Image: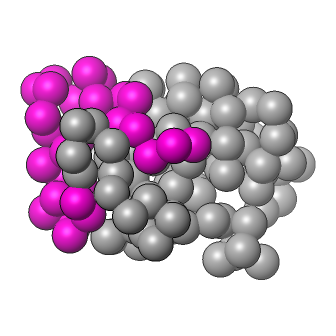
């Protein structure tokens, strides 16, 4: 991804990556940051996801923390909305954590290279 485009900001690049996460898979804040060449910016990816919930074509529910925990669930309006969206895609969630996390993890660094 060309992050030299001056017309885009970091959030725009994050959203481009998140739009590529397939249904039934999840990725992490850190994996996105690393893919964008900003390895230590997982928190900034989280801020982008917090701002993304009003953008219809950004599947923010597919981004979780490095352990598969639904850390952004309170930004979805209803406490169970993020989990419901993931479960509708076939992802099992128990106690706000993605089950079989390694199996459903989508790494943009591997998938998009």
- Residue at the (65%, 26%) spot, across then down: 44
The scheme the figure's colours follow is one colour
- Residue at the (34%, 51%) spot, across then down: 98
Q: Would you say 71 lies left or right of 74 here?
A: right
Q: Position of residue 24 (x, y in %)?
A: 32, 70
Whether the magenta-drawn stretch holds residue 43 is answered as: no
For the record, the magenta segment spans 66-92
Task: Pick whichever, 45 or 80, lies toward us.
Answer: 80
Q: Position of residue 55 (x, y in %)?
A: 34, 40
Whether the magenta-drawn stretch holds residue 73 is answered as: yes
Task: Pick whichever, 56 or 60, lies toward us.
Answer: 60
Q: Quadrant of residue 1?
A: bottom right
Residue 67 visible in the snapshot: yes
Is residue 39 depicted above or below 22 in this figure? Answer: above
Q: Position of residue 58 (x, y in %)?
A: 39, 50
Q: Would you say 92 lies left or right of 70 here?
A: left
Q: Would you say 57 lies left or right of 80 here?
A: right
- Residue at the (51%, 65%) spot, across then down: 102
Question: Which quarter of the rendered picture does the C terminus lie within?
Answer: bottom right
Residue 13 visible in the snapshot: no
Is residue 100 depicted above or below 14 in this figure? Answer: below
Q: Would you say 49 lies left or right of 33 here?
A: left
Task: Count up the numbered dots.
Answer: 0
Q: Position of residue 81 (x, y in %)?
A: 14, 38
Q: Quadrant of residue 88?
A: bottom left
């Amino acid at each position: 991804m060309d992050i030299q485009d001056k017309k885009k900001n970091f959030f725009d690049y994050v959203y481009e990556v998140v739009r590529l996460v397939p249904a039934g898979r999840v990725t992490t804040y850190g994996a996105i940051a690393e893919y964008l060449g900003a390895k230590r910016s997982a928190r900034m990816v989280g801020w982008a996801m917090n701002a993304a919930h009003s953008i219809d074509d950004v599947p923010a529910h597919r981004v979780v923390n490095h352990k598969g925990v639904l850390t952004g669930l309170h930004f979805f309006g209803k406490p169970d909305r993020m989990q419901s969206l993931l479960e509708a895609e076939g992802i099992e969630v128990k106690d706000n954590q993605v089950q079989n996390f390694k199996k459903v993890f989508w790494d943009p660094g591997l998938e998009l290279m």
